Image: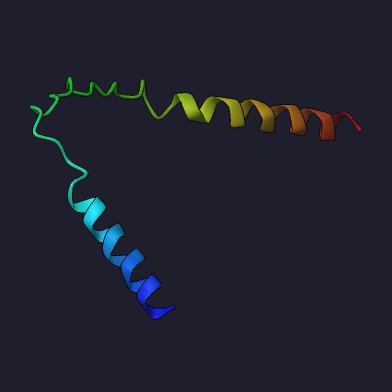
Amino acid sequence: MKKLVLAAALSGAASTAFAGSLAEPIIEAPVIVEEAAGSSSGVLIPLLLLALVAAAVASD
């Protein structure tokens, strides 16, 4: 049983050693990251929701 486990471990290590190729590496295109419009746009929706809740509470 020990020989079987040892053989499996050695064959697994040997197969990963030959996993690469001799082909030229592929050069990827540069990644373009767009910047956010601004931080104030994220505040508008919570303020509108707060105003709606306040109006609902005031009307009761």
Q: Quadrant of residue 46?
A: top right
Task: In the displayed orientation, state which residue is furthest to the right.
Answer: 60
Q: Is residue 16 left or right of residue 52?
A: left
Residue 29 coordinates in the image, percent (x, y)? 17, 20
Q: Name which residue lies at 25% across and 60% down.
A: 13
Residue 49 coordinates in the image, percent (x, y)? 68, 29
According to the image, what is the colour scheme of the structure? Answer: rainbow
Residue 18 coordinates in the image, percent (x, y)? 18, 47
- 55 or 44: nearer the eye? 44
Residue 51 coordinates in the image, percent (x, y)? 69, 28
Task: In the displayed orientation, state which residue is furthest to the bottom.
Answer: 2
Numbered-mark total:
0
Instruction: Identify whether 10 is placed above or below 20.
Output: below
Q: Name which residue lies at 36% across and 20% down.
A: 37
For the C terminus, give its image quadrant: top right
Instruction: Identify whether 6 is placed above or below 16.
Output: below
Q: Is residue 48 left or right of residue 26?
A: right
Instruction: Identify whether 22 is placed above or below 4.
Output: above
Q: Name which residue lies at 30% across and 58% down.
A: 12
Q: Is residue 7 left or right of residue 53?
A: left
Q: Name which residue lies at 18% across and 52% down.
A: 17
Instruction: Identify whether 18 is placed above or below 48.
Output: below
For the N terminus, give its image quadrant: bottom left
